[in-house]
Image (spheres, rainbow, N blue to C red):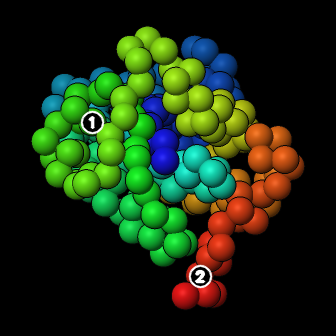
């Protein structure tokens, strides 16, 4: 099991600078909104949402959520949900690899893992967690910057559709051209 997170800026409605260009009206609106939120001390005031991932080493099935931050409590709760998801597939998690973020070094995350072995990547060596890093690269090209969304809600809906596509329809060269769902017995939930 690989676990990681990346931060992704929440674009303004209609898309951000990657769609409309630097200095565009949309880009200036996004900057102004982040500045207002920062002055108000709002959570996520930098305009970022965080993608937390858990990827099964064998099948490449991904469980992922867009969350508002990366605090230890959030990471621990995410892991609890991810582990439950994999348990419904009949996947028994024996080890988790994460980066060295403070949320993963916390007691809260260690308690969420329980008896599961916790491995950490070498500092400044993202290739140690290569499956997640490749997932992030694919995610960026096929979802995050592939099309403009009219709202954050539309972006999140597109994300859930993309995760479904990744797990059920997208062939992976790393597993011989198969789709991840073909390598997990109960991904559809039809069998017990």
Q: Nearer the viewer, residue 134 or 40?
A: 134
Classify 10 Å Cα crowding around label 1: few (below 14), some (14-19), many (20 and above).
many
In the rendered image, residue 58, in percent from the top left (x then y), is placed at: 63, 51
Q: Is residue 105 left or right of residue 18?
A: left
Residue 154 in view: no
Q: Is residue 159 left or right of residue 72?
A: right
Instruction: Identify the residue shown where x is 65% and y is 73%.
Output: 185
Classify 10 Å Cα crowding around label 2: few (below 14), some (14-19), many (20 and above).
few
User: Vertical placement of 12 versus 26: above or below?
Assistant: below
Q: Label 1's element? A: loop
Q: Within the image, what quadrant is residue 130 found in?
A: top right
Instruction: Identify the residue shown where x is 60% and y is 24%.
Output: 17
Instruction: Identify the residue shown where x is 65% and y is 32%.
Output: 134
Q: Nearer the viewer, residue 104 or 47?
A: 104
**How many numbered marks are there?**
2
User: Vertical placement of 26 versus 156: above or below?
Assistant: above
Dot 1 corresponds to which residue? 104
Dot 2 corresponds to which residue? 189
Instruction: Identify the residue shown where x is 38% and y is 14%.
Output: 123
Q: Is residue 78 left or right of residue 88?
A: left
In the rendered image, residue 44, in percent from the top left (x then y), is placed at: 29, 36
In the rendered image, residue 64, in percent from the top left (x then y), is placed at: 49, 52
Q: Is residue 162 left or right of residue 160?
A: right
In the rendered image, residue 5, in percent from the top left (x then y), is placed at: 43, 36
Q: Within the image, what quadrant is residue 140 found in?
A: top right
Residue 76 in view: yes
| Label 2, label 1: how far apart the Cα atoms are | 30 Å
Question: Which of disc 1 and disc 2 is earlier in sequence?
Answer: 1
Q: Are marks 2 and 1 in contact (CB under 8 Å)?
A: no
Q: Which dot marks residue 61?
A: none
């Amino acid at each position: 099991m690989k676990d990681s997170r990346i931060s992704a800026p929440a674009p303004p409605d209609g898309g951000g600078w990657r769609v409309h260009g630097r200095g565009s009206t949309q880009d200036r609106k996004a900057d102004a909104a982040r500045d207002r939120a920062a002055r108000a001390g709002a959570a996520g005031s930098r305009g970022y949402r965080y993608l937390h991932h858990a990827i099964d080493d064998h099948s490449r099935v991904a469980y992922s959520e867009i969350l508002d931050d990366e605090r230890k409590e959030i990471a621990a709760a995410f892991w609890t949900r991810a582990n439950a998801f994999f348990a419904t597939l009949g996947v028994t998690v024996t080890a988790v690899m994460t980066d060295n973020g403070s949320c993963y070094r916390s007691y809260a995350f260690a308690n969420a893992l329980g008896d599961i072995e916790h491995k950490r990547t070498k500092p400044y060596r993202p290739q140690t967690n290569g499956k997640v890093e490749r997932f992030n690269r694919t995610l960026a090209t096929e979802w995050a910057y592939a099309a403009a969304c009219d709202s954050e809600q539309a972006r999140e809906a597109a994300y859930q559709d993309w995760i479904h596509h990744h797990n059920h329809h997208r062939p992976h060269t790393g597993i011989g051209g198969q789709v991840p769902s073909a390598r997990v017995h109960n991904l559809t939930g039809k069998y017990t």
